[in-house]
Amino acid sequence: MKKKQWRHTEKGVSNGMNGKYHIEKNTIQETLVIPLWGRKFATEIFGDIYQDPRAVEIAAQLDYDFGALEGKTKSFFIAIEERFSGCALVFDSANKTAVKIMLKTYVKSAGITDVTKYFYVSDPD
């Protein structure tokens, strides 16, 4: 198998295929793409209440198949929005331990006192 040749370009690192940053499946880089895509998706679907144009811009520069995330994420966001209509929803990629830490540190230090529900996903599949 031929080793990929990477080169630095004006836009960053490219594999020469399409000028985009290639993200391999089952890598650390892929774990960073998932929350990025969620922010991009939220901007596109809930643009009236959430905007992250930088996430949209970055996602457009990636060579990654977002198809698997799209179906699952769309149905998830829509179900959550319907279930908690009128509530402020905050999403992050966090497991059970991370949620506990977040509630004890960030939420408390930010003065957020009206958190009544939180949940985590231990196995997204």
Image (spheres, rainbow, N blue to C red):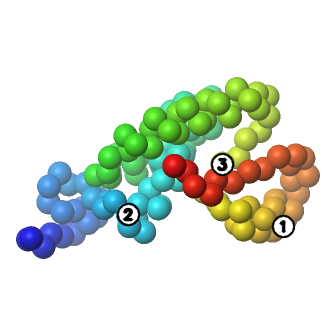
Residue for badge 2: 26
Q: Earlier in the sequence, mark 1 or mark 2?
A: 2
Count of marks placed on residues: 3
Residue 11 in which image quadrant: bottom left
Q: Residue at x 54, y 46 (%)?
A: 39
- Residue 120, image quadrant: bottom right
Marked residue nearer the N-terminal end (3 or 2): 2
Q: Secondary structure at mark 3?
A: loop
Q: Which three-letter amino acid code belongs to the residue tagged 2?
A: Asn
- Mark sitting earlier along the chain (3/1): 3
| Front residue (pair 86, 11) | 86
Q: Alpha-carbon neighbours of circle 3 within 10 Å: few (<14), some, or many (≥20)?
A: few
| Picture coordinates of residue 27, whole percent (x, y) | 38, 67
Mark 1 lies on residue: 104
Q: Is residue 43 visible?
A: no
Q: Residue furthest left?
A: 2
**In the figure, 28 relative to 72: above or below?**
below
Q: How many angstroms separate mark 3 from mark 2 (CA)?
A: 22 Å
Element at badge 2? loop
- Spatial CA distance of label 1 from label 2 is 31 Å
Q: Residue furthest right?
A: 113
Left or right of 35? Residue 108 is right
Q: Amino acid at mark 1?
A: Lys
**In front: 110, or 92?**
92
Task: Assign the N terminus to one quadrant of the image.
Answer: bottom left
Which residue bears the numbered disc 3? Answer: 91
The residue nearer to you, when weighing 99 against 62, is 99
Tell me if label 1 and label 2 are in contact, CB under 8 Å.
no
Give me the disc on residue 81: none
Residue at horizontal 61 percent and vertical 29 percent from the top:
78
Residue 16 % position (x, y): 14, 60
The nearer-to-camera label among 3 and 2 is 2
